Amino acid sequence: MFEALLQRKRHFEYPIHRLALCLGVVTVGVCLMAPPLFAAQAVDNPQGQEQSQEVTALRELVTGLQADLMSMHSRLEMLETQLAAMEEAKLQVGQLPPAVEEEFERLEERQAEDRQELMEEIENNRRTIAPLVFTPALTMFGNAAGRLDSKPVVSPEGDRIDDQFMLRAAEFELRAAVDPYADAFLAIPLEAETPNGALEADVEEAYVLLKGIPRLSSLPGGLKLKIGKYRPEIGKNNLIHFHDLMWTTRPLPVATFLGTEGLGVFAEAGFQATGINTDFFLPSPSENATLVSQFGVAWSGNLAVTRGNEGKNPIFYTHQSWYQRLNDSQAFELGGSYLNGAANLDGSLRSQLVAADFTYTWKPGRLGQWRSFVAGGEFFYASIERPELAAETPLGFYLFGQYQPTRNIYLGGRYDYTQALADERIRDRNWSAYLTHYTSEFLRFRLGFEHRMSDVAERDGLNTFLFELNFVFGVHPTEPYWVSR
């Protein structure tokens, strides 16, 4: 009987060292899962668009690891139960032969040592890997572009920029989890203000995204507070950074109404503001719809429609959006924005901006990485008060479409129309076509052509051929909404 008992005990002996290694791997996997999730949250579309395939795969991996961890814990509990049963059997049998007694003691000592080693292994992994969750994810973007023009082209700063090839920008982005309640984002671009001039550093965005408070992991209605310097969601295009555009140049009405920098539309456009932005979910009419409401108050010195104020008074704005998934392949999004701010230094004159945007996407499930189509546009209408004169009421809009015929090729076109802020009788129109090729998600080439029609003779009839190179290294961010890979 003693020999049978000893054989049973040896049969249940379990290699705890392997368990420690498996638990360590699970700990590493779960901890390393956090940074991609935070990165995805920092740029995630709040209207409920699909998450990237990389994040979905990582979630499935972690789910599997968690199942393995539970299985290991169950096996460890079973081992302990079996050892306890054998100990009880030993007591029932009474005095054991010396050899069997020594074997019991040896196995008990080994079980205690292995359990202690297991606990130490888990603690060491936690202390080693957990700090990585709060280490910023660093990404660097580079953008170079060339142009051939049929006429001389002068930037807003008075520099000739026709027939040039230049490094337009290099941008560093850092994303991190500050703590369980907040994420942080920092974007530092180095941009050329003159053709092939020195790249000048600036802070384009630097904000904290507050998602919860102590004792309350999430705020009511999914409320999030963005505090710092950021790109307000006036329309859709202003949110997108230069390197994530589907075109080589910003649309003309974006540059006209929201502002531009040294190289004009050939460089960065849109505006940043420093303030507080709130967004939260509204009750949805169906499970396939997402309604989001945003309100903000901020100060901005480079917003075109309030540039006369030089950022001395705050601007107030709101953006409302409706995202609707039609089926597994199609979705559309509608948005509306309103902005109000001072038009002069003392704030006695006001500027108002109304904007609307729409986006339609088609990504078939069976060929989701090989075919896609996206179309959309934005409309702008401003009312800018002037001293002793009637307010200027310029109008602008752009429309675009893009088709993906293969995994790495994108073909598209865009039409721009805008009236000048200072004189709405001056109109500019622009037709553009482009072809984009991805060699990988880290390297992108683009060819383009633009034809300008304008009431200003120097710009009328301008034809421009464009070449663009965009490269990325570091932690890979979420792809722009127009990319299907």
Image (cartoon, helix red, strand yellow):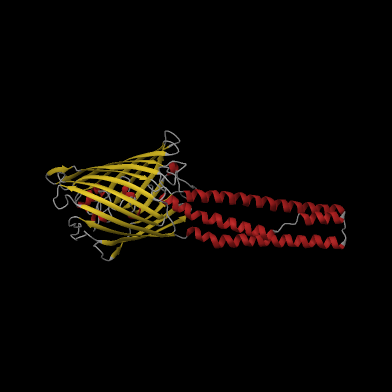
Identified at 71% across, 62% down, the residue is 113
Q: Tell me if I can see residue 58 in this picture.
A: yes
x then y, percent, for residue 195: 24, 62
x then y, percent, for residue 27: 58, 56
Q: Quadrant of residue 379?
A: top left
Identified at 27% across, 61% down, the residue is 165
Q: Quadrant of residue 117?
A: bottom right
Identified at 69% across, 59% down, the residue is 16
Image position of 420 with respect to 195: above or below: above
> 263 or 385, which lies in front?
263
Q: Residue 185 vs residue 23: left or right? A: left
How many circles with numbers are drawn on the protein?
Answer: 0
Q: Residue 73 vs residue 423: left or right? A: right
Q: Tell me if I can see residue 214 in this picture.
A: no
> 107 or 427, which lies in front?
427
x then y, percent, for residue 365: 46, 41
> 473 or 100, which lies in front?
473
Q: Quadrant of residue 6?
A: bottom right
- Among all residues in the image, which is located at the extreme top? 285
x then y, percent, for residue 226: 38, 50
- Among all residues in the image, which is located at the extreme left? 388
Q: Residue 61 vs residue 402: left or right? A: right
Image position of 321 with respect to 74: above or below: above
- Among all residues in the image, which is located at the extreme bottom? 198
